[in-house]
Amino acid sequence: MEALSHIVQAGFDQQQADADKASSAAIGAGFAYGLAAIGPGIGIGYLVGKSVEAMARQPEAAGMVRTTMFLGIAFTEALALIGFVVFILIGL
Amino acid sequence: MLGLDFPKINEVLRWQDFFASFNKIALIAVGAALIGIIVFLLAGRRDPLVAPKGVRNLAEISVEFIEDGVVMQTMGREGLGWTPLLLSLFIFIYLCNAPGIIPILYMPATARIAIPLFLSLLVWVTFIVVGFKHQKLHYILDILWPPGVPVALRPLVGVIEFLSIIIIRPFSMTVRLFANMLAGHILLVTFALLTEAMFQAETHRPILNALGILPFAMLLFLTVFEVLVAFLQAYIFTILAGVYIGTSLHSEH
C-alpha cells in the first residue's frame, strides 16, 4: 500500500515538474524576446533618425543614404530576429 | 470568457503532402519559379522596336530597379554582370513571400527555413568563389591576417573576421528572411484567431462582438504591412547578396 502511494506520489511529482517546466519555458520565452528587442529597437530608431536627418540635409544623396539605411537596419534587426527564433524554439 | 487556444507551431506551418514530399510550400516555390520564368520569357519575346507594354513593362521596371537600386549602389558599373543573378533572387524571393497574404494560399514559402537556407548558401558559395577567383589566395589570407591592423591585434581581428564573414553571414541572411516571414505569418494567424474567437464567443456576445472589430482592424493593417515586408525582405536579401559579392570582387585595402 505504501509502495503504491509512493508510485502515485512520484507520478504526481512528475506531472508537477512538467507543468513547472512548461510555465518556466513560457516565462523564459517572453523574456528572451523582450530583452532581444530592446537593443535593436534603440538601434533602429537611432539609425533611421540619423538617416532622415542626413536626407533632409542633403536631399540629392537620399538614394545612397536610403540603401545604406536598409543595410544597417538589416544588420541591426538580425539580433531581434534571432531573439524571435529563440522565443519560438523555447516557447511554442 | 474566451476559449482561445493558440495552435501548436506545427499546425500553423505543417501541411499535408499532396504526394510524396510535395506540399503547399513546395507548390508555392515551384509556382514562384515558374511565374518568374514565364513572365521574363514572355517579356523577352516581344519585338524590341515596339513601345513596351504589359508584361514587358513590368520586366523592364524590375530590371531597372535592380540595376539602379541594388547593383549600382553596391558594386558600381563593373557589377552590372551580376544583374541576372540578383534579379532572379529578387523575383523568386518576392514571389515566395507574396503568397503570405494571397487568399487561399496564405503561406509565405520562405517562412520555412529550407528556402532561405538554400538561397543564402547559394549566395555564400557565390561570394566565396568570386573572392578566390578575383583575389586568388589573398582573399582568405586577408580575412585571416587582415592588413592595416596593428600586428598584435591581427590574430584576434582575423578570427572575428573569419567568423563574421564565413559563418555569421549565411546564418544571418537565412534567419533574417525566415524569421521576418514567420513572424508576419504568426501575427496574421494570431489576429485571425482572435477575431474569429471574438465573433463566435458564447458568452457576453454583444460586447465581444463589438470589440472584435479591433483585432479585425489590426488584421487588415497587418495584411497591408505584410505587402511592404514581402517586398522589403526580398530587397534586403538582394542588396546584401550584392554587397557580399561586391566586397569579394575587390579587396577593401
Image (spheres, coloured by chain):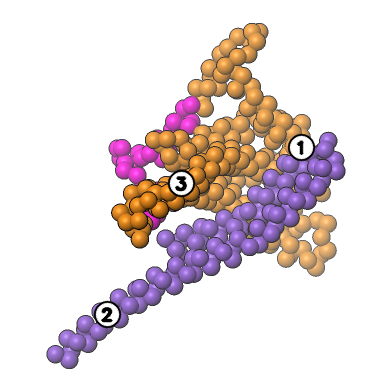
Do the residues under discs 3 and 1 have CB atoms within 8 angstroms? no
Please identify, in this view, whether the residue under mark 2 or under mark 3 is nearer the observer: 3
Same chain for the residues under marks 3 and 1 in the image: no
Disc 2 crowd, CA 10 A, few/some/many (<14, 14-19, 20+): few
The residue where tag 1 is placed is: A63
- Chain B colour? orange
Q: In this view, does A59 lie to the left or right of B194?
A: right
Q: Which residue in the rendered view is the most extreme toward the left?
A: A1
- Provide the residue span drawn in magenta: B6-35
| Chain drawn purple in the picture | A
Q: CA gap, disc 2 to disc 1?
A: 64 Å
Where B95 sits versus B176, above or below? Answer: above
The residue identified by callout 3 is: B213
The answer to whether B6 is drawn above or below residue B48 in the figure is: below
The residue located at (85%, 40%) in the rendering is: A58
Q: Mark 1 lies on which chain?
A: A
Q: Quick one: B54 or B45, which is closer to the camera?
A: B54
> In the picture provided, is B208 more to the left or to the right than B175?
left
Q: Do the residues labelled 2 and 3 touch (CB within 8 Å)?
A: no
Q: Quadrant of the N terminus of chain A?
A: bottom left
Question: In the image, B178: left or right of B51?
Answer: left
Task: Report the residue marked by disc 2.
Answer: A12
Is there CB contact under 8 Å for labels 2 and 1? no
Mark 3: amino acid = Ile
Q: Which of marks 2 and 1 is nearer the N terminus?
A: 2
Q: What residue type is labelled 2?
A: Phe
CA gap, disc 3 and disc 1: 39 Å
Under circle 2, the secondary element is helix
Residue at x-position 46% and y-position 61%: A89
Q: Is mark 3 on a helix, strand or loop?
A: helix
